Amino acid sequence: MRRAVAKGIHAPEEFEAMRSENPPVDHPLVRTHPETGRKSLFLSENTTTKILGLTEQENELLLPLLLRHVKSAEFHCRLRWDPHTIAFWDQRCTLHYAVPDYCERRVMYRLSIDGDVPR
């Protein structure tokens, strides 16, 4: 699978600058969790551009299907935010999909911990 900086949400010159700092990289589409051994899809609507080894036509059909699948309600975990709420999730098997269904101001700090190389 090919992951790259999201195109279409940034001005062209900003996109090119981001792309030069973060060139496209290949990752496995299905990743195995290093501790549980469970498999999960490892893709993102914002960065996944194609599935390697598939034709353009196959990518046009399969990639949108998989991206819709990972956003299915059966996989959701909704959190009711209150002051001082803290949330943690394992990025190795979780897709963060922020639903913009709120109007209050939120202040969030994001932290990433170095992990293993996806396999």
Image (cartoon, grey):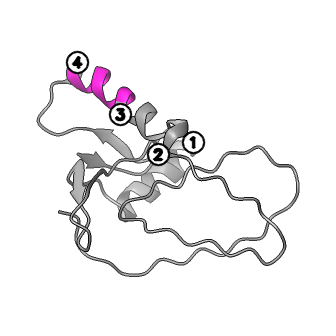
Judged by depth in the image, the label closer to the viewer, 3 or 1, is 3
Closer to the chain start, of discs 4 and 3, is: 4
What type is the residue that disc 4 sits on? Gln
Mark 4 residue crowding within 10 angstroms, few (<14) / some (14–19) / many (20+): few
Residue at image position (46%, 54%) is: 95
Secondary element at tag 2? loop
Q: CA distance from mark 1 to mark 2?
A: 9 Å
Choose between 75 and 70: the one closer to the eye. 75
Q: Which residue is mark 4?
A: 57
What type is the residue that disc 3 sits on? Leu
Residue at image position (65%, 52%) is: 78
Mark 3 residue crowding within 10 angstroms, few (<14) / some (14–19) / many (20+): some
What type is the residue that disc 1 sits on? Ile
What type is the residue that disc 2 sits on? Asn
Q: Which residue is mark 3?
A: 66
Closer to the chain start, of discs 2 and 4, is: 2
Estimate the x, y position of residue 34 in percent, counting from the top left: 23, 71
Q: CA distance from mark 1 to mark 4?
A: 24 Å
Secondary element at tag 1? loop
Judged by depth in the image, the label closer to the viewer, 1 or 4, is 4
The answer to whether residue 110 is magenta is no
Mark 1 residue crowding within 10 angstroms, few (<14) / some (14–19) / many (20+): few
- Residue 9: which numbered mark, if any? 1
Q: Which residue is mark 2?
A: 46
Closer to the chain start, of discs 2 and 3, is: 2
The answer to whether residue 63 is magenta is yes
Res. 57 image quadrant: top left
Residue at image position (86%, 61%) is: 105
Choose between 51 and 101: the one closer to the eye. 101
